Structure formats: C-alpha cells, structure tokens
C-alpha cells in the first residue's frame, strides 16, 4: 500500500500515470510539469510563496550559496536508516531533488502549497513525487513515512508525529541567532538576533544537533535575491531598501541548526 491519502475523504489514494484517485473515486490530475494538485475540490487554503520570492530563491540557490548547508544535511541523512522520505514545504525542490539523487534507493515526496514553485520542482525531477497540498493537513497516511524534512517551513508537529512511523526521524533546519546578521545590520539601525534555535522538540528524542555557519560574498544582484527570499523585503523601511540597492557587495553570514530527532515510541501501560 502507498503512503497517499485523499485530502477530501481521507481514504487511500492510488497513483497512476494520469494522477491520483481514491477509493471513493475522488480524482486529481497530474499537471504537465509533473506535480499533482490536491487542493482542488478541498477546503484547503490555496496560497504559498509569491512569484517574486520563488524566482529569487531559484536564482540564489542555483548559484550554490547554500551548498554547505545541503552537504551537511546529506551527511546527517547518511546516518539515518530510511526508505520513504517526505519534504515539508519543498518549494522548487532544490533540497528535495538533491537528497533524492544522493539516496537513489529511497522514495521521496515533496509537499508545498505554491503551484508556481511546484511547476519548477516538477520540471527538475522524474524521481520525486510533488504534491500541491497543505503541510498543516498532509495527504499522507498515518505512520507511513520514515523521515521528514522541514527546511525553514512552518512547524506542524502534530502532523509530523502522525505521518512518521514509530521510531521514524525528523530533520529540522532552523536559523541560528546570527543568521543573516550583516543583512539586517544594513537594513535596521537596531538589530535583533533571531530566537535561539532549539535542541529539543516536544514529543521527540534528540539524536543530533549540527550547527552550520559560513560567510557568503554577495554581489548586488545576489544580495537583492537573498533579500527577496526573506520577510525583510516587506518589513524594512523604504529608505533602507533603497540604500541596500546601492551596495556593490556585502559579506553575509549564514548560520543554521540541523536538528535530528526521532519519534518517541509510547510503551503500553
């Protein structure tokens, strides 16, 4: 049996070359770019990242600036026994595709609400299943997944717990306190550090904590792409944004925490 469940009736879904169909005959067609939209006919909020952010993120990640993070992530996954992986908030599939290529014997599904992002993701790969759906209400069967990835996406821990098999693993990539510090210094007169990244997630046992930090030498164009990827593009004063646009380059540190946890198996009383 597969891992998919219908977003309408919660019954098992079967995948075919045209899309997906559940036991109650709810049908979802595959788009020409490869993803399947499971928000059609459901009450899920249809949203996701805006097009400008998607374009900027594709350009920025495509130049390899976050490659050290990707390599650290793949190194950590090599320590985990798994077959079925799920990327929550997969966007354009930069991390999903790279991880799927690094572990060709595994099966991967990427979930995101942004159809525009999934159009790019679907064109990247023939060996990853991409779904337009909410990570708040995943179209995934209970206890069917070995490993979940959550890379800068909102945390819906109840859903992660539901879809993970007993003893399954979850990997979270979170910003550290000084992540993008120099970018914020260029935008704000007073800078607030990010909240400290956790080492423990309730309901899970911590397996490892890996902190990854590196400095990027960004051209003006790449700096503006990075800005567009962040909430700061909408929250900064116009004069600060205008000033940033005049910079020829900027050294910006990236600082992440890769938190690996396992689902606690509850013992019978």
Image (spheres, grey):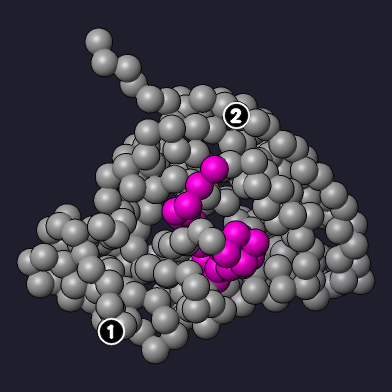
**Residue 43 versus residue 26 in the image, above or below:** above
Q: Which residue is mark 2?
A: 207
At x 13%, y 71%, the residue is 26
| Residue 44 part of the magenta-drawn span | no
Residue sitting at the far left: 24
Counting every numbered tag in the picture gives 2
Q: Is residue 192 visible?
A: no
**Residue 219, position as x, y percentages in the image:** 87, 71
SS at circle 1: loop
**Residue 141 versus residue 222 in the image, above or below:** above
Residue 19 or residue 136, whichever sits in front: 19
In the picture, measured across the screen, residue 256 lies left or right of residue 10, that is right
SS at circle 2: strand
Dot 2 or dot 1, earlier in sequence = 1
Q: Quadrant of the C terminus?
A: top left
Question: From mark 2 to mark 1, how far is it between C-alphas?
Answer: 40 Å
**Residue 52, position as x, y percentages in the image:** 58, 75
Q: Which residues are magenta?
A: 81-104
Q: Is residue 252 visible?
A: yes
At x 78%, y 50%, the residue is 254
**Residue 11, position as x, y percentages in the image:** 15, 57
In the picture, measured across the screen, residue 59 lies left or right of residue 4, that is right
Residue sitting at the far bottom: 32
Return the mark for residue 18. 1
Residue 6 is drawn in which quadrant?
bottom left
At x 38%, y 25%, the residue is 265
In the picture, measured across the screen, residue 101 lies left or right of residue 186, that is left
In the picture, measured across the screen, residue 243 lies left or right of residue 79, that is right
Residue sitting at the far top: 269
Q: Quadrant of the N terminus?
A: bottom left
At x 70%, y 56%, the residue is 70
């Amino acid at each position: 049996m597969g891992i998919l469940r219908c977003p309408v009736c919660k019954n098992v879904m079967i995948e075919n070359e045209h899309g997906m169909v559940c036991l109650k005959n709810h049908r979802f067609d595959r788009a020409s770019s490869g993803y399947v939209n499971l928000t059609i006919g459901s009450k899920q909020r249809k949203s996701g990242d805006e097009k400008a952010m998607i374009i900027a993120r594709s350009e920025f990640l495509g130049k390899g600036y976050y490659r050290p993070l990707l390599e650290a992530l793949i190194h950590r996954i090599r320590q985990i026994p798994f077959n079925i992986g799920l990327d929550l908030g997969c966007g354009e599939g930069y991390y999903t595709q790279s991880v799927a290529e690094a572990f060709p014997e595994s099966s991967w599904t990427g979930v995101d609400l942004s159809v525009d992002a999934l159009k790019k993701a679907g064109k990247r790969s023939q060996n990853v299943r991409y779904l337009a759906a909410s990570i708040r209400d995943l179209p995934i069967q209970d206890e069917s997944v070995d490993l979940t990835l959550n890379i800068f996406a909102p945390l819906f821990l109840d859903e992660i717990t539901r879809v993970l098999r007993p003893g399954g693993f979850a990997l979270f990539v979170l910003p550290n306190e000084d992540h993008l510090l120099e970018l914020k210094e260029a935008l704000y007169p007073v800078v607030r550090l990010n909240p400290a990244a956790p080492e423990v997630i309730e309901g899970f046992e911590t397996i490892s904590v890996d902190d990854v930090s590196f400095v990027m030498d960004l051209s003006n164009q790449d700096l503006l792409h990075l800005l567009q990827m962040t909430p700061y593009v909408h929250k900064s004063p116009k004069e600060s944004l205008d000033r940033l646009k005049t910079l020829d380059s900027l050294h910006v540190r990236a600082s992440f925490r890769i938190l690996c946890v396992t689902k606690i198996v509850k013992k019978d009383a």
